[in-house]
Amino acid sequence: MAHYPRTRPGTGAYAASHALFDALITRVGDVEMAARPEHAVEEFIAGDGREVLKQVLQDHLDARAVAEPRLAEVAGADQVVRRRAEPGHARLLATTLGEVEVTRIAYRAPAVPGLRPTDARLALPEGHPLCTAVVHETVAGALREARDGLARLTGQQVGRRGTFWRKADRSVLCTGSSPEAPLVRCHWSQSVC
């Protein structure tokens, strides 16, 4: 995963996004870009623009992590109360914009798995827009073509096995009962996350 400028205290939650956007505008306005044909400029903006959008999402997630309240206690489905809070637990999330990092507080107790309430608020681990893109790309085409199309569309590399699983499950997405319910549950392989 490429490392992007992280937010520094006192510079604003979206300072890194602003810096990347300003760099993109500066690059598009330089003499070299003025000599390129329109399609080359458009391709450049689409590629680097995706990086700007990914940074906006990263800055948003970082701002949410900073604002996450520490709870006195959390109980899971096992009814075990967890009072020990450990901030700074991070995980990668595959999105249509690329991989981003989600940081949240984990709540722990002896001999039981930790809980992360922010995962539920963010609907993790699924990256629903990326799952939807996988299904749509595989509905009408061959797996290799779908994989290549997703790489062009999202910049994400989905393995053949993951693509095949999602293709087999496409009817779940196409026949979902309500727009509020998650339509397909994706568990990303190491090739994506």
Image (cartoon, rainbow, N blue to C red):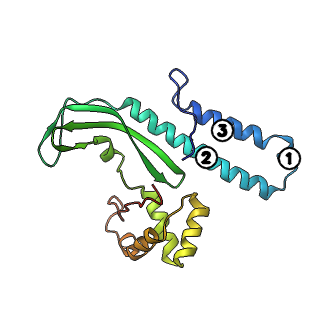
Q: Is residue 24 found left or right of 154 in the rendered image?
A: right
The location of residue 8, given as percent across then percent down, is 53, 25
Secondary structure type for disc 2: helix
The residue positioned farthest toward the left in the image shown: 79
The residue that label 1 is drawn on is 34
Q: How far from the left and from the top, in percent, is residue 1?
A: 54, 47
Question: Left or right: where does residue 94 sit relative to residue 32?
Answer: left
Q: For the residue carrying disc 2, how many other residues have a C-alpha within 10 Å: few (<14), some (14-19), or many (20+)?
A: many
Q: How far is mark 1 from mark 3, CA to CA?
A: 18 Å
Q: Residue under label 3, please give it.
A: 21
Residue 108 vertical position relative to residue 163 in the rendered view, above or below: above
Q: Which type of secondary structure does the marked residue at label 3 adopt?
A: helix
Residue type pointed to by label 3: Phe
Residue 154, x across and y down, in percent: 57, 58
The tag earlier along the polypeptide, 1 or 3, is: 3
Asked whether, in this view, residue 123 is left or right of residue 14, the answer is left
Classify residue 110 by image quadrant.
top left
